[in-house]
Amino acid sequence: MNDRTHRSVTMRRGALAVTLLAMTIGGYGLAWAQTTSAPTDDDRLAAILARSETMIGEMRAMQAEVMELDLALDGKVAEMYAASEDHRLEATQAVVEELVTQRKIMRDHMKGSHQQLMMHMMEVLLIEDAELRERALKQSPVMRMILPPHESGGTGAVGYGEPEQ
């Protein structure tokens, strides 16, 4: 067999192998699609509420971190006021550095939180089924926190406390 014929046979075998592989994978995909049912409204609502609870937990963690940052800043300010005139400039520098660092931390937190909050709001508000959307609005701790009481059944207060039951 010459080199040209050998390449032709090899290419045909390769094409046949790829075709068989695609047919096999496609068959499994079709079988999986036929055995997998679409999520029910309760499944969708449970997933939305789970993401909402996760967001509330992250917000509470961020709130605790802010309190720690405040304590650190309070300590630096106390050191600045207690510093002698010889060390006042260094102490003031330390306060300014702490403020800059904290601002960067908060900006990053807010950026991530804002995007996550917008995604959650859109996920809930764009639910086509009106009954499911209303259930999500009333049960999602995040939506209850940010929407007025007449729209969500929540307090409308911005805070991360326990949602009303």
Image: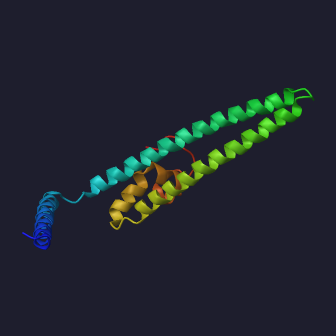
Q: Quadrant of the C terminus?
A: top left
Measuring 13% from the left and 57% from the top, which residue is drawn there? 35
Q: Quadrant of the N terminus?
A: bottom left
Q: Foreground residue, 90 or 142?
A: 90
Q: Foreground residue, 103 or 18?
A: 18
Q: Is residue 32 left or right of residue 141?
A: left
Measuring 33% from the left and 50% from the top, which residue is drawn there? 46
Residue 38 vs 83, above or below: the answer is: below
Measuring 17% from the left and 57% from the top, which residue is drawn there? 36
Percent x, y of residue 99: 73, 42
| Any part of residue 100 in sight | yes
Q: Is residue 139 left or right of residue 105?
A: left
Snapshot colouring: rainbow
Residue 126 vs 114, above or below: the answer is: below
Residue 120 vs 100, above or below: the answer is: below
Q: Foreground residue, 13 or 153?
A: 13
Percent x, y of residue 157: 57, 50
Q: To which quarter of the image does residue 12 belong?
A: bottom left
Measuring 43% from the left and 45% from the top, which residue is drawn there? 53
> How many numbered discs sit on the rendered protein?
0
- Farthest residue, direction front: 2
| Any part of residue 154 in sight | no
Percent x, y of residue 16: 10, 67
- Farthest residue, direction left: 1
Residue 146 vs 96, above or below: the answer is: below
Q: Is residue 41 left or right of residue 64?
A: left
Percent x, y of residue 6: 11, 68
